[in-house]
Image (cartoon, helix red, strand yellow):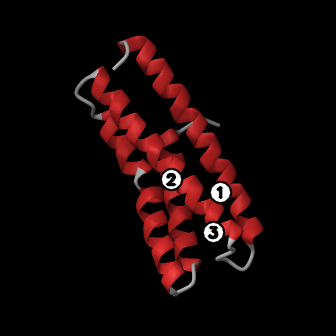
Amino acid sequence: MKFDLEERLLEYSVRIIQLVERLPNSRVGNHVSGQLLRSGTSPYPNHGEAQAAESGKDFVHKLRVTLKEFRESQRWLRLIKRVPLVNEPALLDDLLKETEELIRIFVTSIKTSQKNTGPH
């Protein structure tokens, strides 16, 4: 199977949206869902921005923004699981695992890009 990061990021956004739709319509649920919706769907378009970067430095910067959003999403997912804000918190395990894998991919990409373009 070919590794397709763009497709993986699109699927991640879909999964975030599906989770957000399952969060309770309460003060807490609405707050958390808004924050997770923003941070969890932004890596997909941010990756597109990185692909259109104007320089190596710009590319690394956009990858760092994407990484930041993944780390924020990871925190929101952990909070949702801990409260819990869903009926079956164990369902979040796979999404948390995917978030961790994507974080590792972007950390590695940033390190590789910095080696190739120099520090920024």
Tag on residue 82? Answer: none
Going by the numbered disc 3, the residue's amino acid type is Ile
- Residue appearing at x 47%, y 79% in the figure: 30
Q: Nearer the viewer, residue 120 or 58?
A: 120
Dot 3, crowdedness within 10 Å: few (<14), some or many (≥20)?
Answer: some
Residue position for label 3: 80
Q: Secondary structure at mark 1?
A: helix
* Residue identifier under label 1: 95
> Where's the C terminus, which quadrant?
top left
Residue 18, x across and y down, in percent: 55, 71
Q: CA distance from mark 3 to mark 1?
A: 12 Å
Residue 15 placement: quadrant: bottom right
- Percent position of residue 40, x then y: 48, 57
Name the residue type under label 2.
Glu
Q: Residue at x 42, y 18 (%)?
A: 114
Q: Residues within 10 Å of mark 2 (few under 14, many from 20)?
A: some
Q: CA distance from mark 2 to mark 3?
A: 13 Å
Nearer-the-camera pick, 2 or 77:
77
Left or right side of 108 for 48: left
On the picture, is 16 further left or further right than 63?
A: right
Q: Nearer the viewer, mark 2 or mark 1?
A: 2
Residue to which mark 2 is pinned: 72
